[in-house]
Image (cartoon, helix red, strand yellow):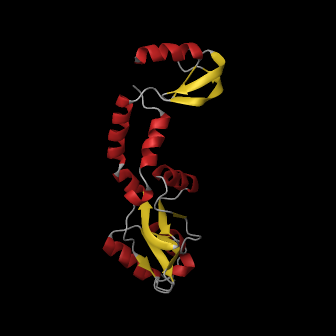
Amino acid sequence: MRLGRHELGTAYQRIKVGDVMSTKPITVDPTIPIKQVAEIMAKKNIGAIIIVEDEKPIGVVTERDIVTRVIAKGLDPEKTIVREIMSQPLITVAPDTDLSEAMRMMSKLKIRRLVVVNDGKLVGMITETDILSVAPELIDLLYETSRSTAPVYSVETFSGYCDMCNRWTDNLIEVDGMFLCEECRKEYLKQEE
């Protein structure tokens, strides 16, 4: 049986950002030189540092920021301070945000990490790597879900060509990720029983 889009979304919604995030992100003051930030990144083997001022996160500096905003422009990393190149405004999520929502945000904004904040307080960071680390468990969860559930239906109808018979209809309904006409839905359900 093919996994439906609904099942995939449901699995990701069961996992929250707080379940996956790194809980001890490295932070620095906005007035330190970029050279020092680069040294911290190298020593800690990380690709981003959160900038904190008055105990509140205000920006982030990534390896890419250093390359594109300092090195490529010929700026002196010993004289350029973090505040001058940090990415802001800071894009944040709450720890109880569904992982699927965080993934959509990252994709839409074309970013690879989100700062996790709870009541204005920094509590972590979630990266693409953190999300990928739970992928094997999600695949197992999706497999088990597909074995124990009936086909997943969409409640919306669409106009278009049926994925099974290629005939045009104004009554397509999504079943397990396929858009099927009424006749093909009946046939598909008989096969699944």
Q: Which residue is found at the position 44% from the left and 57% from the top?
A: 17
Q: Answer whether residue 191 is visible to the viewer in this image.
A: yes
Q: Which residue is found at the position 59% from the left and 18% from the top?
A: 181
Residue 51 at x, y percent in the picture: 49, 77
Residue 108 at x, y percent in the picture: 57, 52
Residue 34 at x, y percent in the picture: 46, 80
Q: Which residue is found at the position 56% from the left and 12% from the top?
A: 183
Residue 42 at x, y percent in the picture: 34, 73
Q: Is residue 174 above or below residue 89?
A: above
Q: Is the N terminus in the top left, top right, bottom left or bottom right quadrant?
A: top left
Q: How many marks?
A: 0
Q: Is the C terminus in the top left, top right, bottom left or bottom right quadrant?
A: top left
Q: Answer whether residue 66 is visible to the viewer in this image.
A: no
Residue 23: quadrant of the picture = bottom left
Q: Is residue 46 above or below residue 148?
A: below
Q: Which residue is at the front of the view, 69 or 4?
A: 4
Q: Is residue 1 above or below residue 76?
A: above
Residue 123: quadrant of the picture = bottom left
